[in-house]
Amino acid sequence: MRRVMTGVLILATVAAAVACDPTTEAILGLGGGVSGGGGDSSAVATRLVFTQQPQTTQATAAMATAVLVEAQNDLGAVDTSYNGLVTLALSSNPDSAALGGNFSVSAIFGVATFSNLTISKADTGYVLTAGSGALTAGFSSKFTITP
């Protein structure tokens, strides 16, 4: 019985200390937290991040795996209140190819899903960029389009 009381006291002490520091509070998931829209300004999306990269695909064929882009805050958490329009473009385009499919979609709960992207020409070193309003643009890793 004595150990339980000690554990409760320690937990209460940690919770009291955390309540004074909103950064620690957000990291531990207590109080206002890191989801979009709380009183903590770090919860608001500031950048776009590719969380599911483009895969090697045949020219003109739709990518088999959807490309995912998240609107994240400075702590790397998804801003689930973000629903802005996210647009992809070819940042590195070694063969003057055209990007096809639906490359401009609204984020849902902070995540933009691009499920039917195509690239018109085979080559290596393609890179996608994601943009949305004032958010810092995100860049995919390099990928290849096969003949």
Image (cartoon, rainbow, N blue to C red):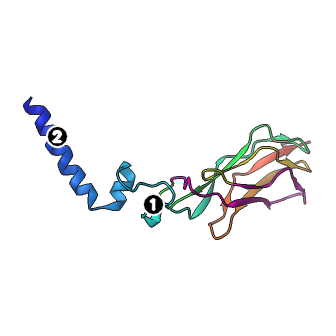
Residue farthest to the top? Answer: 1
Residue situated in front as seen by the camera: 103 or 33: 33
Label 2 secondary element: helix
Label 1 secondary element: loop
Residue situated in front as seen by the camera: 97 or 110: 110
Residue depth check, mark 2 versus mark 1: number of the one nearer the observer: 1
Q: Quadrant of residue 5?
A: top left
Q: Amino acid at mark 1?
A: Gly
Query: Which residue in the structure is indicated by mark 1?
Result: 38
Question: Which mark is drawn over residue 145?
Answer: none
Above or below: residue 107 compared with residue 62: below
State the separation of the CA atoms marked 2 and 1.
28 Å
Identify the image quadrant of the N terminus: top left
Residue farthest to the bottom? Answer: 134
Write down the region rendered in magenta.
Answer: 77-106
Residue farthest to the left? Answer: 2
Query: Which residue in the structure is indicated by mark 2?
Result: 8
Whole-percent x and y of residue 51?
63, 47
Whole-percent x and y of residue 99?
86, 55
| Label 1, residues with CA under 10 Å away: few <14, some 14-19, many ≥20 | some
